Amino acid sequence: MERNDEWVRVERTDAFKELIRSKRAFIIPATIFFMVFYFGLVFLAAFTTVLNVKVLGPLSLAYVYAFAQFAMTWILMHVYVSRANKWDVMVDNARREAADDIGEAR
């Protein structure tokens, strides 16, 4: 049996299809959110005066936004890791489902 045949069998399982749907449902919106949030600072700083507002003493909204990017990155990373742990279970399910298909085929 070729390695390619094994991959095709795993790819056709319902568990693998659900894994791919789940990953896309998280990764695409998370990436869009990250890019908009990240480049939002650059855009707002370059083309508007919105971030010039003083928040606390000499601290402007630009600094608050910039530090918020650190928090956003860590929060997004934690959410991703928790989702990835669930995806690991889904990968195991896809493996088992493909292995069961092999057993039934024999």
Image (tube, grey):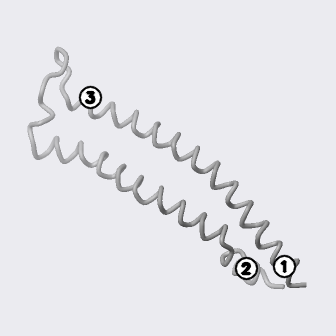
Question: Rounded to the nearest whole Å, what is the CA distance between mark 3 and mark 2?
Answer: 50 Å
Q: Farthest residue toward the top?
A: 57
State which quadrant residue 92 falls in.
Answer: bottom right
- The quarter in which the N terminus is drawn is bottom right
10 sits left or right of 70 in the view = right
Q: Position of residue 64 (x, y in %)?
A: 26, 28
In the rendered image, which residue does mark 1 sit on?
102
Q: Residue at x 31, y 46 (%)?
A: 38
State which quadrant residue 65 falls in.
Answer: top left
Q: Earlier in the sequence, mark 2 or mark 1?
A: 2
Q: Identity of the amino acid at label 1? A: Ile
- Residue 80 got which mark? none
Q: Is residue 76 above or below residue 6?
A: above
Instruction: Tell me whether circle 2 and circle 1 mark residues in contact (CB < 8 Å).
Output: yes
- Residue 9 got which mark? 2
Q: Earlier in the sequence, mark 3 or mark 1?
A: 3
Disc 2 is placed on an element classified as: helix
Q: Residue at x 35, y 51 (%)?
A: 33
Q: Earlier in the sequence, mark 3 or mark 2?
A: 2
Disc 3 is placed on an element classified as: helix
Q: Position of residue 96 (x, y in %)?
A: 79, 66
Q: Residue at x 21, y 32 (%)?
A: 62
Q: Identity of the amino acid at label 3? A: Val
Q: Nearer the viewer, residue 9 or 77?
A: 9
In the rendered image, which residue does mark 3 sit on?
64
Mark 1 Cα within 10 Å, few/some/many (few <14, many 20+)? few
Q: Position of residue 85 (x, y in %)?
A: 64, 48
Q: Farthest residue toward the right?
A: 106
Q: Residue at x 35, y 37 (%)?
A: 69
Observer-side mark, 3 or 1, equals 1
105 sits left or right of 64 in the view = right
Question: Rounded to the nearest whole Å, what is the CA distance between mark 3 and mark 1?
Answer: 56 Å
